[in-house]
Image (tube, rainbow, N blue to C red):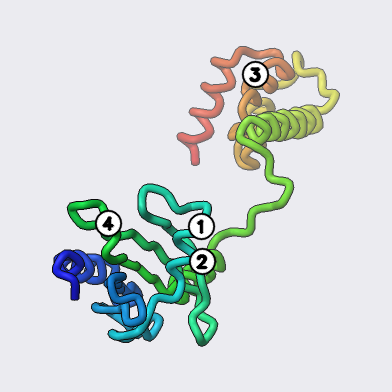
Amino acid sequence: MNSFVEQYIPIADVIAKTFGSDCEVVIHDLTIPQNSVVYTVNNHVTGRQIGQSFNHLITDVLLSQNFTNDYSANYYFRADDGRLIKSSTVLIRDQDKKVKGALCINIDTTKITENITWLNSLLPQVPENLTDTSSQQFEKSYEMDHISEVANELIDKIIGNKAVNSLRRDEKIEMIRFMEQKGIFLIKGTIDRVAEKLKISKVTVYSYLDEIKEKN
């Protein structure tokens, strides 16, 4: 092995240990191109063996549009058994800037793909017509307006056409009790609506509600 290439062995080891058993690192000594593979870690990923030659250096690295600054990152190829391998390769130069070797990182994407598929299966299905946040806010505002409209109609129906000025206090309280039981006062603006329809103040409506809660 070329002595300059040999010093990249610790780098290969630390990369493999950092990313785990699905990460293969191969060092090529390009001074002996027919037998360029001189070191491997986790070589079960692609089956690269010491003494083999390079496979993808020309087509996927040197001739790649992504090749810049002596490296090509994140290109893909298929292993012999069809698994998709994500790969990156960097050239190794000596002190005279001459290429002496290459360090290749090959990651088996099988588990990653399976995990992504599994995680996606747990996510809620997002409607295709999902709009942006501003649209959602508008729709929410429209929805609240619709809810308020329904609540106001209910209030009008409950009070009806009664002559509210002639209603006794206990009759008004009973109407408010019914509304409170049905959750009408959970809707914004209903206190104002009831006060208006019964021709009493909001303070009076609140006092009736307090009285109802005390009796419950």
For disc 1, the marked residue is 64
Could you say which quadrant of the image residue 181 lies in? top right
Which SS class for mark 2? Answer: helix
For disc 4, the marked residue is 98
Q: Answer with mark 3 or mark 4, whichever residue precedes in sequence.
A: 4
Which SS class for mark 3? Answer: helix
Badge 2 crowding class, 10 Å Cα cut-off, few under 14, some 14 to 19, many 20 or more, is few
Give the foreground label among 4 and 2.
4
Task: Give the image location of residue 76, x and y in percent.
Answer: 50, 67
For disc 3, the marked residue is 192
The circle drawn on residue 59 is: 2
Task: Give the image location of residue 68, x and y in percent.
Answer: 42, 49
Of residues 39 and 198, which is closer to you in this image?
39
Type of the residue with mark 1: Ser
Residue depicted at 55% across the width and 25% down the height: 208
Q: Does residue 38 appear to the left or right of 63 in the view shown?
A: left
Distance between mark 2 and mark 1 Cα atoms: 7 Å
Badge 3 crowding class, 10 Å Cα cut-off, few under 14, some 14 to 19, many 20 or more, is some
Q: Answer with mark 4 or mark 2, whichever residue precedes in sequence.
A: 2
Distance between mark 1 and mark 4 Cα atoms: 20 Å
- Residues at badges 3 and 4 in contact (C-beta under 8 Å)? no
